[in-house]
Image (spheres, helix red, strand yellow):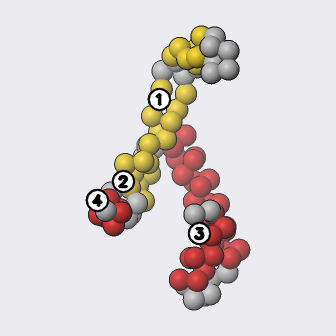
Amino acid sequence: MTHKQLVALIHKRLHGSVTHGDIERVFTEFACITADELGRGEIVTVRDIGTLTALAVAERMGTNPKTGEKILLPASKRVKLKPCVALKTRVQ
């Protein structure tokens, strides 16, 4: 499902009581706030979805797939989602 399809589905489920633009603004703010919080090392919990955390990944050796050359990949952060029980149950 694309972002546009998700916005349209939410609009439909709310019977048009909220505009597409309002839904877009909520998603944009949610994404910005979540990124800011994760960047500060905070944990973000979204009810009925799960918990988002930023994990530090140490620098490591990797391989360039085109040339086969060994390269050093710098340290970085990754985002991990630990789904809640409600989400796991609905998916299964």
Please rate how many residues cluster around mark 4, counting C-alpha atoms within 10 Å: few if below 14, some from 14 to 19, many from 20: few
- Spatial CA distance of label 1 from label 2 is 19 Å
Residue where numbered disc 4 is placed: 85
Say the numbered circle drawn on residue 83. 2
The amino acid at mark 4 is Val
Which residue does the image show at 62% across and 53% down from the upper left? 32
Residue where numbered disc 3 is placed: 6
Q: Earlier in the sequence, mark 1 or mark 2?
A: 1
Residue where numbered disc 1 is placed: 56
- Spatial CA distance of label 4 from label 1 is 25 Å
Mark in the foreground, 4 or 1? 4
Mark 3 touching mark 1, by CB under 8 A? no
- Spatial CA distance of label 4 from label 2 is 7 Å
Q: What element carries label 1?
A: strand
* Residue 86 point in image, percent of width and height: 31, 64
Q: In this view, does 43 lie to the left or right of 69?
A: left
Q: Is residue 45 above or below residue 40?
A: below
Which residue does the image show at 60% across and 80% down from the upper left? 11
